[in-house]
Amino acid sequence: MTGRLRTGIERNMFVRSSGAGDSSDTILWIHGLGESGLCFEELVTATGLAHWLHLVPDLPGYGKSPWPRVPMSMLAYADMLGEWLQEDRKEPVVVAGHSMGGVIGTFLSERFPGTVRAFVNIEGNISEEDCTTSGQVAGHTRDSFMERGFEALLRTVYQAGSEDRSFRMYYPSLRFCDPRCLYLNSVELVEFSREETLALRMRGLKIPTVYLSGDPGGAGARSRSLLDRAGIRWIPVPDTGHWPFLDQPETFTSLLLEELP
């Protein structure tokens, strides 16, 4: 890491920020299910993106942000982020969302078109085959997940981390998240993905969009087919999985910079 990371509280969210850009050169990073902004720290403090201002919130119920009294839906997250951008940013921003964050970013771009100038979807859900963790969680009843499913998920991710750095990075954030939010958002992700309309909704945005996919361990054949059918340009990041920015940060940054307006 080379840049300085700053932290603060915005709208009851823990927010990391970095970079030297001004309000006209801002990227909002939205993390995925069970994740936090921790996953983006190395990326946004690297020299390759230093000329952009980066905003990296932990969504309520995730990471270092307080748990909400009532679990929040993904649409509620999109509205909260959109209202924050409207009040805080003078110019539209680039939104970059990973996994669940890609779905939230789609909704944010739909509902607050004047606040977003471009959208980068990183491994966001497109079809049900993308519901790896969310599908496991949603396979429980709410009570069974709260009683034993969450602890079982923690053990699975911990064990996977012995061989995969991405899961070692994921585990600390997962331990901090509110299991109520994790369950609700997992059920939502499965429902939205099963509908197979997320690629079409991305096509409907009136801004530049791109989908960055892990390769070979990222979005599968069904999701790529739906992206093709919707006319969404997608770019594979070689030698990566679901967290391409962790697996190959330099390659990911190079591809991202080619796409940023």
Image (cartoon, rainbow, N blue to C red):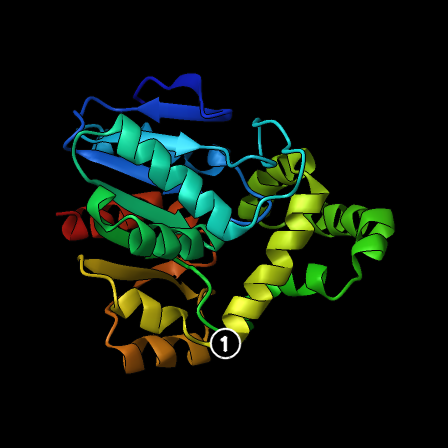
Q: Residue at x 60, y 45 (%)?
A: 34
Decide: is 218 above or below 35: below
Q: Residue at x 22, y 34 (%)?
A: 26
Decide: is 68 above or below 5: below
Q: Residue at x 43, y 52 (%)?
A: 104
**Residue 44 position by quadrant:** top left
Q: Residue at x 39, y 38 (%)?
A: 81
Q: Out of 214 and 137, give the one closest to the viewer.
A: 137
Tell me the SS state at disc 1. helix
- Check disc 1: other Cα within 10 Å, few if <14, some if 14-19, many if 20+: few
From the image, which quarter does the N terminus lie in?
top left
Q: Position of residue 4 (x, y in %)?
A: 33, 17
Q: Out of 119 and 201, give the one closest to the viewer.
A: 201
Q: Position of residue 258 (x, y in %)?
A: 15, 51
Decide: is 155 above or below 53: below
Labels in figure, total: 1
Q: Position of residue 146 (x, y in %)?
A: 81, 48
Left or right: 88 as drawn, with respect to 154: left
Decide: is 190 above or below 166: below
Label 1 sits on residue: 195
Q: Indicate the amino acid at tag 1.
A: Glu
Q: Out of 37 and 181, give the one closest to the viewer.
A: 181
